[in-house]
Amino acid sequence: MAAIEWGFSINRPRVIDVDRNNLRKSDEILLEMPELQSCIGCGACTASCTAGNLTNFNFRKVHTLVRRGEYQGAYEEMNKCMLCGKCRLLCPRGINTRGVVMLIKRKLGDF
Amino acid sequence: MERVIVIGGGIAGMKTALDLNRRGIGVTIIEKENRLGGKVLGWHRLFPTFTPANEVVDTLKAEVASSEIDVRLGTCATALTEHSVTLSDGTVLDCDAVVLCSGFTLFDARIKEEYGYGIYDNVITSADLEEMFNQGRVGLKNGGRPRRIAFLHCVGSRDEKVCQRHCSKVCCVTGVKQAIEMKKLFPEADVFNFYMDIRMFGPGYEELYREAQQSYNIHFIRGRISEASPTIEGRLQIKAEDTLTGRPLKISVDMLVLLIGMRSNDDNASLAESAGLQLAQSGFMAPRDLFLSNVRSNRDGIFYAGTVTAPKSIGEVLNEGAAVADAVTEYLS
Amino acid sequence: MRRATWSEYQKDIADDKYYYARSCIRQNFFPGSERAFLNILSKDLGKDILDDPAHSSCTGIGYHSDIVPLETIMTVVARQFSLMNEAGYENFVTSCITSFGIYTEVLATWEEFPETEEKTRENLYKATGREFTKPKSLAHTSDIIFHFRDLIADKAVRRLVNRATGEPLKVVEHIGCHYAKIFPKSGIGGSEFPYVLAGMVDSWGGECVDYPERRHCCGFGFRNYLVQANRGYSIANSHKKLESMAPYHPDFIVANCPGCTMFLDKWQYTIAEMDGRTYGENGHGIPVLTYEEMAGLVLGYDPWELGMQMHQVDVEPLLDKMGVDYDPSAKYLGRNGKYIGKPEAAVVNGCSQDFIYDIKV
């Protein structure tokens, strides 16, 4: 390859490529906690989130990405949770949100 | 004896005819097909209880057959007034009132060219899938078992681009029902439902939706598919936005099911013109009002029941059949 | 490739007497193509076409880069129409997809908002003393070739067929976004399954490839690539398309837009040098043709007359496949045998590889 200073490089796609993602971990998580799949994206968890109000932590978005096989950074994100439990009181689908935080941390420590 | 002409022999027409007949009123049903039953004939099982569709249709048909209702098949109404109906062969039938139960038309999925219906194998509609269920042959064109199935909600509904601004109401729960049925048939397959909003308006629907998510692990992704293209393995690549994560998403699937909407019949406009009836913006007939006179037209003596006025579920259609019989009886007395 | 609806998207294309508007950039990147179009129309098909030196750029590049205001571009468009009137023509054909998009958009705007047409008439009169009438028909030059595709097939000296195997050549057709994505009805076959290039390929014996990113934009996008810092996302679009089409082993790409043809051709070099990723047979790239070049080859034109030595990706492997006679030593000889210079060696120029490339086959 020629040593050329291009001043730009080829952008990598932002697309969630479900074909490329390995859904095994996601399947394991959903098998252990099937009610997570019943999330309707209302955002009550994020609205009440202690961490989410002061950092860019978005619990709803992170677990949705995990369900699509996007694990990168999920563990680190979940570490922002203070485990206060307010979200669990609000979830209209009765999801054990604190349990989700712990489950993702347990399953995705390598990512 | 008074005579009422019911235009359309689907479930709305049959229910209306039966309820009028029971009150000693003479009824003639005009049906354009060569059999009674309408669109429900093409359906396999009904949401949210998975009741076989033929239980409903066959019961109504048997009741009509054992009644004195005059049934005219293979002919349609081309014009009407409150005292007469003109048939396609030019015959004019006199009557004392008319109930228009001519239903709806299924949206033609080919108009949404980007999904490749009619071009790519294994892009099918919800109606095609029911037909497959009825024939007991569900699978890919080549006979294979799908490993990944996508459903797309709102095809021909809530879509300005195809002049269908209204919500077809029943497709959401149909998508949930069919997703569960596919998961039962192909437990190893992953099923994805792409939706804009999930509208679970009826009894048991929300519960069915939740069951689909929690018990059947059906993935619901909020985002409208923008296009389907073929892949080299003979699958379909679809693109959408996963709006809840704010990122575009692409996925290959073996089968894409388009949940097609209900649109107004093309001949609504000419029928409306012949009788001086009002049309809604959606092209469906506009009832006199949506509350106390929702089965009456703007003209005395002409009534509506069923999906001729808007998309409705089967239960709602049957209720309207009963309601319109009441309204007609009151009018005739 | 299957299509269901292309015949529902038709438009009136005039049979003769065209006023020709050139593209700004094609004469640099594919310099023989516009000349080939004029020759095919006037010499092979015996049509009357005027190549008027008085017309100007439509200023579309400036318009799409927020430099030229809408009122100005409307006035420029009006002036082109006025020149066409003056020359006694009423069928406007444009060589550029951006221009085609501009003309259709301006005509539609005048239709929807007649006050803008009035204002344009006033502006044109004030600026130049000219008046104008709108064209009877507006077409892109690929529409014209499409219109005469069967006549060209009758006169063909060769077809889009691999001479060694007798198999049809596999062709990726790429349509410029502004051809049919602004007004689907103004393009042959609409925007989802455009038939303008595919119809030529079908008529001339080739076979179109339907691949996942077929409808995706090449990434040209004016201000997006004009600014160097933005080019990463511009090139990523061509990259995405090339990655998606590679498994189908296309013999060549044909495009109808100046920007797309240039991008799909030149970015192959950039991607090879930047990422080490190359496409096509032996990693020598997938040749990218204009539809005039494709028609020219079918009609027996000399590839160097068609300007094909100016491509970034070498076209010789394709010429060999089609059985085209050409003089390799004449490649870099321009008019009157004058040497025009030669590009640096690169993998997409069929040169040996000094570096390890990740060849995508």
Image (spheres, rainbow, N blue to C red):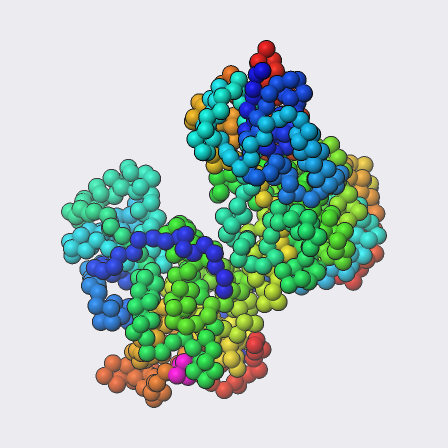
Q: Name the quadrant of the C terminus of chain B.
A: top right
Query: Is residue C244 shown left or right of residue C85?
Result: right
Q: In the rendered image, which quarter is residue B147 located in?
A: bottom right
Asked if the magenta segment contains residue C319, the reply would be yes
In the image, residue B265 lies at what x, y percent? 51, 36
Residue at the far top: name it. B333
Residue B121 rendering spot, x and y as whole percentages: 58, 59
- x, y percent for residue C307: 32, 76
| Among the 4 quarters of the image, the one containing residue C36 | bottom left
* Dominant secondary structure, magenta: helix
Q: Quadrant of residue C46?
A: bottom left
> Residues in magenta?
C318-323
Question: Which of C101 and C76 lies nearest the eye of the viewer?
Answer: C101
* Whether residue B66 is situated above or below residue B212 in the rendered picture: above
Query: On the rendered structure, is C69 left or right of A51?
Result: left
Task: Residue at 50% x, 87% y: name it.
Answer: C352
Instruction: Mark yes or no: residue B320 visible.
Output: no
> Which of the image's four quarters has the N terminus of chain B?
top right
- Of C38 and B98, nearer the camera is B98
Q: Nearer the viewer, residue B133 or C34?
A: B133
Residue at image coords 53%, 62%: C213
- Which residue is at a point 16% across and 56% down the rendered structure image? C87
Query: Horizontal placement of C79 versus B204: left or right?
Result: left
x 50%, y 62%: residue: C2
Tell me residue C331's x, y (percent).
Answer: 34, 84
